[in-house]
Image (tube, rainbow, N blue to C red):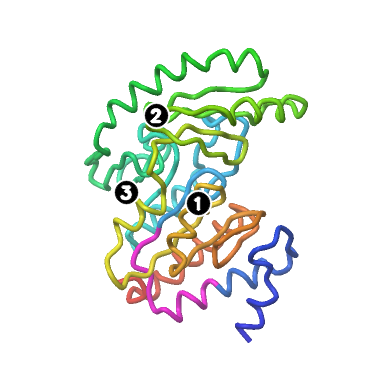
C-alpha cells in the first residue's frame, strides 16, 4: 500500500491535492522507520522553516519554531543550512546550533567555533567592491535591493513590480565576476563563491553508511537534492524537483518535525 501512495503523489510535478499532504507526511515517517534511523538532519531556513517574506530581516523564527528546533537537537545531530551569512542566521536562532552558512562558505558548530573556507576574507572584501559597482541597479530597477553578505552579493527583487522584472533579468544575466558564479532563486539572484553549494558541504559532514534528512525549497537546494539522491530529501512547496518527497509549505514541514520530535521522545533508539 505504501508504494501505491507514493505513485499517487506528484513528486516531480507542480500541482498536488491538499488532501494528500497527510499521506505524504505518513510516507516520510514510514521511510524513516523502514531505515531504522536518521543520523543527521540538515534543514534549510527561508521558505523551509519560515515563510518567504518581502524583507529578509522580517523572517525571524517564532517561539514555536525555536521550541521545535531545540527539541530536535536533543535527538539528532541537527544543522541549519542556509545561504544567509553566519552573523545573520546566528542572530535569528541563537546559540547551541550547528550552522552551515553562505551555502557552505562559513560555519559555526554548536559550541560556537567558527570556520570559513580558504581566502574567505578576500571574497568578503570583493563583494563590498561589487556592491558599489552594481549599486546603480537599485535606481534603475525600483524595488530591487542589493545585499552585501560579506562573501556573496544578493540581488533581492521580491518588491519589484512585474513590469521591471524581465528587464532586470536580462540585465543581470550578463554579469560575470572572477571567483563567483551567478545563480537564481525565489525572488533573488546571487553572486555566490564559485564551487560552493549546500550539497557538497553536507556530504563533507557525512560518514559512510549514514542516512540523513535534508529539506529545502529553492534552486540551491536542488543542487543538494541531486548530490544527496540516496538520502531522505524533502522539497518544500511547488516546482520541479529532484527530491524524493514533497510537502506543501513550511507549515506542513513543521508538522512533520513535531511528529519526529514526539515520536522519538518515546523511541530513543531511532536516532542513535
Q: Position of residue 1 (x, y in %)?
A: 63, 87
Using the image, determine if residue 145 lies above or below residue 196: above
User: Circle 2 is placed at which residue position?
Assistant: 178
Residue 31 is covered by the magenta coloring: yes
Q: Taking 182 as reference, is 112 left or right? A: left
Name the residue rendered at 38%, 43% in the picture: 195
Q: Position of residue 167 (x, y in %)?
A: 70, 26
Disc 1 secondary structure class: helix
- Mark 1, Cα crowd under 10 Å, few <14 / some 14-19 / many 20+, is many
Name the residue rendered at 41%, 47% in the picture: 197
User: Circle 3 is placed at which residue position?
Assistant: 98
C-alpha separation, residue under disc 3 versus residue under disc 1: 18 Å
Residue 222 is covered by the magenta coloring: no
C-alpha separation, residue under disc 1 versus residue under disc 2: 24 Å
Q: Nearer the viewer, mark 3 or mark 1?
A: 1
- Of the numbered discs 3 and 2, the one sitting upstream in the chain is 3
Q: Quadrant of residue 16?
A: bottom right
Using the image, determine if residue 157 lies above or below residue 47: above
Name the residue rendered at 27%, 27% in the picture: 121
Q: Taking 37 as reference, is 115 left or right? A: left
- Mark 3, Cα crowd under 10 Å, few <14 / some 14-19 / many 20+, is many
Q: Count of labels shown?
A: 3
Name the residue rendered at 50%, 47% in the picture: 220
Which range is magenta?
A: 28-41
Q: Taking 121 as reference, is 147 left or right? A: right
Closer to the camera, 180 or 264? Answer: 180
Q: Quadrant of residue 144?
A: top right
List the single residue furthest toward the bottom: 1
Q: Position of residue 185 (x, y in %)?
A: 57, 41
- Of the numbered discs 1 and 2, the one sitting upstream in the chain is 2
Closer to the camera, 53 or 115? Answer: 115
Using the image, determine if residue 235 lies above or below residue 82: below
Amino acid at each position: 500500500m505504501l508504494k501505491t501512495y507514493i505513485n499517487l503523489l506528484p513528486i516531480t510535478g507542480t500541482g498536488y491535492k491538499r488532501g494528500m499532504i497527510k499521506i505524504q507526511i505518513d510516507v516520510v515517517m514510514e521511510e524513516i522507520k523502514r531505515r531504522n534511523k536518521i543520523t543527521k538532519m540538515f534543514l534549510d531556513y527561508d521558505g523551509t522553516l519560515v515563510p518567504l517574506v518581502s524583507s529578509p530581516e522580517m523572517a525571524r523564527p517564532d517561539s514555536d519554531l525555536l521550541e521545535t528546533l531545540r527539541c530536535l537537537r536533543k535527538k539528532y545531530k541537527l544543522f541549519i543550512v542556509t545561504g544567509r551569512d553566519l552573523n545573520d542566521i546566528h542572530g535569528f536562532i541563537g546559540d547551541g546550533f550547528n550552522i552551515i552558512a553562505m551555502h557552505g562558505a562559513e560555519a559555526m558548530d554548536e559550541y560556537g567555533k567558527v570556520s570559513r573556507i580558504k581566502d574567505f576574507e578576500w571574497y568578503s572584501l570583493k563583494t563590498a567592491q561589487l556592491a558599489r559597482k552594481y549599486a546603480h541597479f537599485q535606481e534603475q530597477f525600483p524595488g530591487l535591493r542589493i545585499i552585501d553578505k560579506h562573501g556573496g552579493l544578493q540581488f533581492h527583487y521580491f518588491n519589484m513590480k512585474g513590469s521591471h522584472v524581465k528587464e532586470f533579468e536580462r540585465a543581470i544575466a550578463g554579469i560575470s565576476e572572477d571567483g563567483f558564479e551567478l545563480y537564481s532563486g525565489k525572488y533573488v539572484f546571487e553572486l555566490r563563491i564559485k564551487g560552493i553549494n549546500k550539497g557538497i558541504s553536507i556530504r563533507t559532514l557525512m560518514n559512510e553508511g549514514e542516512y540523513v534528512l535534508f529539506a529545502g525549497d529553492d534552486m540551491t537546494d536542488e543542487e543538494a537534492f541531486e548530490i544527496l539522491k540516496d538520502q531522505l530529501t524533502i522539497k518544500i512547496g511547488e516546482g520541479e524537483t529532484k527530491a524524493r518527497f514533497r510537502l506543501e509549505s513550511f507549515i506542513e514541514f513543521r508538522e512533520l518535525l513535531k511528529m519526529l520530535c514526539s515520536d522519538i521522545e518515546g523511541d530513543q533508539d531511532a536516532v542513535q
